[in-house]
Image (tube, rainbow, N blue to C red):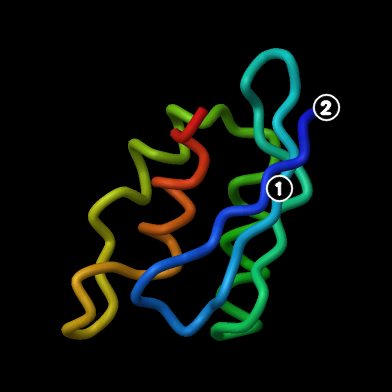
Amino acid sequence: MQTVTYKTKGTCSKSITFERDEQNRIHNIKFEGGCDGNLKAISKLCEGMTAEEISAKLLGNLCRDKGTSCADQLAKAVMEK
């Protein structure tokens, strides 16, 4: 498994760490900072999904007037190679 740490931009969370397996499935998602309960829920719901599935569901989800969100940042993070 590959461990990835992504520095978020424009959100309350500072970074996202996760593991990517050989089938491009995402595991052990952890956010640093942000809305703890909501981000734990997103992490549980996305556990074992492919990067493409996560991106399709979460990309473009916006928080207030920030132009992004922690979920949107996760979608971007998993699609980076």
Residue 18's disc is 1
Placement of 41 over or under 11, stated as above or below: above
Q: Looking at the picture, how far across and down is residue 6, in whole percent?
A: 57, 54
> Which amino acid type is shown beneath numbered disc 2?
Met
Residue corresponding to mark 2: 1
CA distance for labels 1 and 2: 10 Å
x 83%, y 27%: residue: 1
x 36%, y 58%: residue: 72
Describe the element under mark 2 as helix, strand or loop: loop
Residue 2's disc is none
Q: How busy is the neighbourhood of tag 1: few (under 14 within 10 Å), some, or many (20 plus)?
A: many
x 16%, y 84%: residue: 65
The picture quadrant where one finds residue 52 is top left
Left or right, 35 with respect to 27, comes to left
Q: How many marks?
A: 2
Left or right, 1 with respect to 55, comes to right
